[in-house]
Image: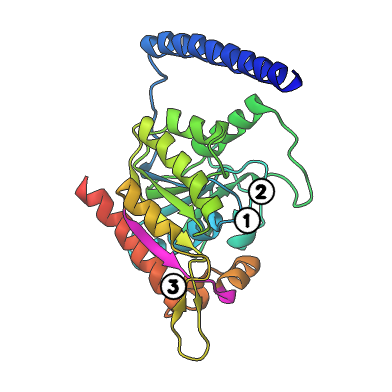
Amino acid sequence: MLVKHLRRTTNKFFSSLYSQNENLNERQKKIMEKGLPKKKPIEGVQEIVLVVSGKGGVGKSTTSVNLATAMAQTKNVEVGLLDADVFGPSIPLMMKLNDSPLLNNDNKMIPLKNYGVKCMSMGFLVTEKSAVIWRGLMVMSALDKLMRHVDWSPTYCLFVDTPPGTGDTLLTLIQNLPISGVIMVTTPQKAAVQVTRRGATMLEKLGIPIIGLVSNMSSVQCPQCNSSIPVFGNEAKSLADELNIPLLAEIPVDSDISRGSDLGTPSIISSPNSIQANIYKKLADDVLTFFKKR
């Protein structure tokens, strides 16, 4: 009897939930018919690329930093890097920047610059030990200032290091900016790939082009024979095939990459001729090729 009662209660709960969801979808449809907010470019920025991940800890910020630095160092274009993670900014550490931005004559913040990359982050505006304890509207307001109250001009490509997941920040960026494309970062494990699949589905529904997938920590190099050992499997490659998007890069586990992030020295700077540096250079090539093929 107890089991039957639980089943009835569960069925009733989900039935109510589905009904509410249908009503919500109808309300959303009416709102959509009124028109979404018009996407407004960032002044002085030509291309905007979001670097996203379904989960934290997969190397999204490391990829953002090394990709932006690789493009700035090797492609002779102006590059910017926006840290959109208001609660957990990591770009100041990874780019070895800890000053506060100055204001120009138009009261816009001047991005801090290192390795040829213009950077902006909430981490420049609060002390290292300060916690940002804000709710949604304040976060969105801060993000808007980091995007639009900054003198980015001229910037050919602005990489945006987003918070993990598909929450308010990512949706706000997609809703308000003309996104050139998205790079999705994952690790090969099933748990990470599964969440990445959901993120890709969301981007597809919103009509946002995916430049490709980056598989981070994809293998370990054997110290004896230098062969690559895929210790975490090959799920990222399977996902790229399933989604029909390019697998842009498979970045091996390397202590130099991790050490460089902690020291604020990207691999492209500390080891410009290394395997990992060449991977990031090719990734920068792929992004530029994507722009040209549109």
- N-term mark: 1 or 2: 1
Q: Which residue sits at x=56%, y=51%?
A: 191
Crowding near pointer 1: few (<14 within 10 Å), some, many (20+)? many
Rendering coords of residue 214 (x, y %): 42, 58
Looking at the rendering, the stretch of residues picked out in magenta corresponds to 246-256
The residue that label 1 is drawn on is 92
In terms of secondary structure, where does tag 3 sit?
helix
Q: How far apart, in angstroms, are the residues tagged by discs 1 and 2?
A: 6 Å
Left or right: 97, with 235 as reference point: right
Q: How far apart, in angstroms, are the residues tagged by discs 3 and 1?
A: 21 Å
Query: Which mark is drawn over residue 128?
Result: none
- Residue at the bottom extreme of this rendering: 224
- N-term mark: 2 or 3: 2
The residue that label 2 is drawn on is 123
Crowding near pointer 2: few (<14 within 10 Å), some, many (20+)? many
Q: Which residue sits at x=47%, y=40%?
A: 199
In terms of secondary structure, where does tag 1 sit?
helix
Amino acid, disc 3: Ala
Rendering coords of residue 220 (x, y %): 52, 75
